[in-house]
Image (spheres, grey):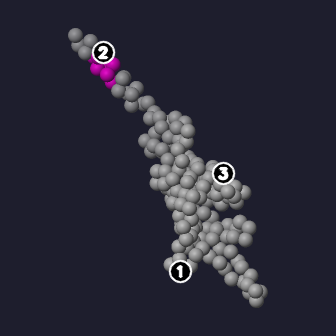
């Protein structure tokens, strides 16, 4: 009887050791949305942070064209495409209006839910700003400047502020 008890106890100990030695599978990429700090073995399920920003968005918003002067900016289509990944912290996305696909703005994903529109010139305009995403809701706040030459040959900056609120279209 003692022999059977010893065999039973050794079996339980071996089972416990075998279970304890198993590696926890999960996403081991700290820059992914579904990173699991307890995972010791990658299971190929990592979702890059920037992918939640990628998609087609229907947007509305306002343009501020001067002190306390807002103009509606309605039915804007935004297309955000995954561009390049310079490194794990330099995740680049492109933002463009459906009507002007060649004028894509570059943005850098700066955290899990935020991105920055890098200061850049597109034609005679210069853009910069920031945005965030919460579920399917995207907000973008940007400044656009244009250098204008006046009739007396002096130049001035025409500045507007774009505030866009968008809903990501469902895939499928």
Residue 67 is marked as 1
Residue lying at 53% horizontally and 60% vertically, measured from the top left = 60
Q: Nearer the viewer, residue 109 or 97?
A: 97
Question: Do residues under tags 3 and 1 come within 8 Å of each other at their CB atoms?
Answer: no
Q: Residue furthest left?
A: 1
Counting every numbered tag in the picture gives 3
Q: Seen in the image, is 38 located left or right of residue 140?
A: left
Residue lying at 73% horizontally and 84% vertically, measured from the top left = 150
38 versus 81 height, above or below: above
Disc 3 designates what residue? 83
Residue lying at 74% horizontally and 67% vertically, measured from the top left = 123
Provide residue 27's location: percent of width, then percent of height.
50, 40
Disc 2 designates what residue? 7
**Quadrant of the rendering where the C terminus is positioned:** top right
Provide residue 165's location: percent of width, then percent of height.
51, 60
Question: Do residues under tags 3 and 2 come within 8 Å of each other at their CB atoms?
Answer: no
Q: What secondary structure is found at the residue carrying circle 3?
A: strand
Sequence-earlier tag: 1 or 2: 2
Q: Is residue 31 visible?
A: no
Q: Bounds of the magenta span?
A: 6-13
Sequence-earlier tag: 3 or 1: 1
Q: Residue furthest top?
A: 1
User: Which SS type dominates the magenta stretch?
Assistant: helix
- Gap between marks 3 and 1 measured at Cα: 36 Å
Q: Nearer the viewer, residue 158 or 34?
A: 158
Q: What secondary structure is found at the residue carrying circle 2?
A: helix
Provide residue 49's location: percent of width, then percent of height.
54, 49
Picture quadrant of residue 102: bottom right
70 versus 28 height, above or below: below
């Amino acid at each position: 009887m003692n022999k059977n008890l010893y065999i039973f106890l050794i079996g339980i100990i071996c089972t416990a050791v075998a279970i304890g030695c198993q590696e926890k599978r999960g996403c081991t990429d700290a820059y992914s949305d579904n990173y699991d700090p307890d995972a010791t073995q990658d299971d190929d399920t990592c979702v890059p942070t920037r992918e939640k920003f990628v998609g087609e968005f229907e947007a509305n918003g306002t343009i501020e064209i001067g002190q306390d002067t807002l103009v509606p900016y309605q039915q804007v289509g935004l297309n955000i495409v995954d561009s390049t990944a310079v490194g794990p912290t330099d995740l680049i996305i492109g933002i463009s209006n459906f009507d002007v696909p060649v004028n894509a703005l570059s943005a850098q994903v700066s955290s899990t839910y935020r991105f920055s529109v890098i200061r850049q010139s597109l034609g005679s305009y210069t853009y910069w700003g920031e945005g965030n995403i919460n579920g399917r809701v995207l907000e973008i706040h940007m400044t656009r400047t244009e250098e204008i030459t006046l009739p007396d040959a002096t130049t001035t900056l025409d500045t507007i502020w774009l505030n866009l609120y968008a809903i990501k279209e469902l895939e499928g």
